[in-house]
Image (cartoon, rainbow, N blue to C red):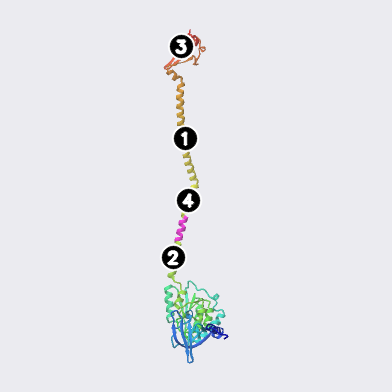
Amino acid sequence: MKNVYSIRQVNLYISNMFRQDFMLNRIYVKGEVSNCKYHTSGHIYFSLKDDSGSLACVMFAGNRSGLKFQMQNGQSVIVLGSISVYERDGKYQLYAREIIQDGMGLLYEKFQALKQELEEMGMFAPEYKQPIPAFSRRVGIVTAPTGAAIRDIMNISYRRNPYVQLILYPALVQGEEAADSIVRGIELLDQSHVDVIIVGRGGGSMEDLWAFNEEKVARAIFQCETPVISAVGHETDFTIADYVADLRAPTPSAAAELAVADMAAIQGQLRDMQQRLQNRMSERLSDRKKELEHLQEKLKYVSPQHQIQEKYQRLTDIEEELQMLMQQTMKERRHQLMIYVERMKGLSPLEKLSQGYSYTADARGKKITATEQVQPGDLLQIYVSDGQILAEVKEKKKTEDWSV
């Protein structure tokens, strides 16, 4: 048997056939919802049916951001998606990317066509977006004079900054004349030199919000020299105005928060900045004070006065050292002198005289040490311990004559 295939091969082949069919990769299918189940994973499983049969469908959780209503059995819807085969079960099904309620199909197609056209013209390009002023003083508002939108904007604006001036253009935001009314409001406020313009309204169906999908409104926003914030519907609602505007706000309340600075928060930031500045200044002053003290000490050390004082102290120390050295030297010299005195005492004639010896000199005071120095009749001075004796030489004898 030739050409025998497994079930997996057959299902894979069929799946490839579906993927290669351009029409099945992007197809709109209209039908009535049945067997609708919201899974805990976030996926939605349902079937589309009509008089001829049914088609299994699934919308994965990642695509649910575009779903703007709660699906229920019996609803008539239009589903945009692709048809492919679930290989495990061998069943084909519609993988939904967008789901809209029937009756909005033509509007949705018109919306998509205009969006693509304006995008190709560059009206959504980020380089054309103007920055929203951080501190607006005059805020223009294009919306209905009654309703929750204007009340929310006024309440939030007053709470954030009661000194901001709000200028309202009471526009029609729904109906056949709404687009022209919105355009006039944008143009008049642009000429009024306001800081920023809020264009929007509360939520509603696609038909209710359609004025903000008109090309004339988109062009008015694009040509406006004043920055424009779009605030149309709820967070999940998107209009052409949102793509053209300089900034999209999910709700009118959020638009007021974006347009009006929160003075309480700014004052808190200023207080924090002031405190940080004071702390930084205190730290810097403390550092500079320590540095100044260090320099003062250094200057004090190298100053002439300090040098003179230092030298004076050094001289004083040297003087004290000299005095101590002199005293020590004098003490040593005195001690040495005493030794010499004691030595000299032993050699002193007076000391000898006190011991019984005498000292003899001639009349001129010349010391007599030998007999040759005198002659009989010479006068002599004899010094003894208690005085002087005057004598005359009668006779002289030498030592060798003593034996006679």
- As drawn, the label of residue 325 is 1
Q: Which numbered mark, 1 or 2, is in the foreground of this view?
A: 1
- Residue type at mark 4 is Gln
- As drawn, the label of residue 391 is 3
> Which segment did they paint magenta?
279-288
Residue that extends furthest to the right in the rendered view of this protein: 2
Q: Which numbered mark, 1 or 4, is in the foreground of this view?
A: 1
Q: Secondary structure at mark 1?
A: helix
Tag 4 and tag 2, C-beta contact below 8 Å: no
Q: Nearer the viewer, residue 21 or 256?
A: 21
Task: Name the spot of residue 293 as percent of width and height, x first.
Answer: 46, 52
Q: Read off the residue under disc 4.
A: 296
Q: Secondary structure at mark 4?
A: helix
Residue at the image point whose x is 46% and y is 19% from the top: 349
Residue that extends furthest to the front in the rendered view of this protein: 1
Look at the image and say whether residue 324 sits in the magenta stretch. Answer: no
Q: Read off the residue under disc 2.
A: 272
Distance Cα–Cα, label 3 vs label 4: 91 Å
